[in-house]
Image: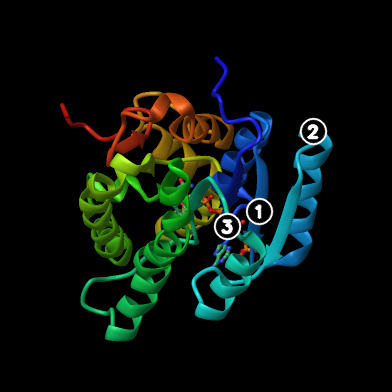
Amino acid sequence: MDLGISGKRALVCASSKGLGFGCAQALAREGVSLVMNARTEGPLLDAAEVIRAETGVDVVTVAADITSEEGRAEVLKATGEVDILVTNAGGPPPGMWSDWSRDDFIDAFDANLLTPIALMQALMPGMMERGWGRVVNITSVSVKAPIAVLGLSNTARTGLTGFVAGTARQVAGQGVIINNLLPGLHDTDRAAALDKGATEAQGITLDEARAQRMATIPSGRYGTKEEFGATCAFMCSQHAGFMVGQNVLLDGGATNTTL
Ligand code: NAP
């Protein structure tokens, strides 16, 4: 299927690895030129080179913390106008509801709520003026089904979900389509870190920890960043123009809900 976005330009945040990289690569494969971002320069330059070598698209890189005001300003300066925005950042750490301080909540809100909102506020007016835009926010399965130890994530990301639900309907008439993409367990460094946490907490091997978690997924495996990226690219495509304010869950069936 031709996604109809060849020649468009996208900002993909937090994209040197993992799900963000999967999205950047899938968009590049459709002929979309990229602004890629991550905090650490070396892996970001390597990731950009992999994508340039494979697809030949133009890739600009900005090494900056997307969750800080200064980092965002740097990214937005290099970005200029874009047609597609994919928001992403690292997720908050696990913990216990009774331990989290006001500062812990503020950090989580900055990273996973206020940063995507600030990026949409900066880039959507241009999209609306030009009459075409796509925004995909990478959130989490935790907005559908809470993950208790990730309470900071549950709280910040459901806030973003509420913002998108209203805003998506305010901008759709000007051709700007906002949706959220909700990862369940995917095979990335983040998943490996959670597996490692389980080995330490339960005194089991890494293979046992992975097997234990995979057994909770009807598909019997983790998702891949390629599958995730392909879904993101579709949500950024011409064909997604009637899909407004949706929360698309990619979790191998792990969330046991009818709707
Ligand atoms: P990952 O493999 O650890 O990759 C994270 C990427 O984001 C890296 O490129 C990292 O590069 C970049 N990054 C992190 N913090 C950043 C910041 N403040 N500014 C700019 N770039 C930043 O993680 P992932 O698995 O792809 O996860 C992506 C998001 O999906 C996270 O929010 C995670 O909580 C959520 N999620 C993931 C899963 C899963 O199973 N993988 C499930 C549910 C939700 P640098 O470190 O160099 O900045």
Measured from the top left, where is residue 74 in percent x and y?
63, 73
Decide: is 41 above or below 192.
below
Residue sticking out furthest to the top: 1
User: Quick one: label 3, few (<14), some, or many (20+) residues within 10 Å?
Assistant: many
Label 1, ligand 1: CB separation under 8 Å: no
From the image, which quarter does the N terminus lie in?
top right
Measured from the top left, where is residue 242 in percent x and y?
31, 28
Residue sticking out furthest to the left: 258
Which amino acid does the dot numbered 1 rest on? Val
Which amino acid does the dot numbered 3 rest on? Ala
Q: Can residue 99 be seen in this view?
A: yes
**At 27% across and 84% down in the image, what residue appears?**
102
Indicate the secondary structure of the residue bearing disc 3: loop
Residue sticking out furthest to the front: 129
Which label is found at residue 54? Answer: 2
Tell me which corner region of the image, top left, top right, bottom left or bottom right, holds residue 96: bottom left
Q: Marks 2 and 1: which is nearer the front?
A: 1
Viewer-proximal residue among 3 and 15: 3
Instruction: Look at mark 3 in the image and give the residue it sits on.
Output: 14
Which amino acid does the dot numbered 2 rest on? Glu
Q: Earlier in the sequence, mark 2 or mark 3?
A: 3
Indicate the secondary structure of the residue bearing disc 2: helix
**At 37% across and 63% down in the image, what residue appears?**
117
For marks 1 and 3, give the CA distance: 10 Å
Q: Earlier in the sequence, mark 1 or mark 3?
A: 3
From the image, which quarter does the C terminus lie in?
top left
User: Quick one: label 1, few (<14), some, or many (20+) residues within 10 Å?
Assistant: many
For marks 2 and 1, give the CA distance: 16 Å
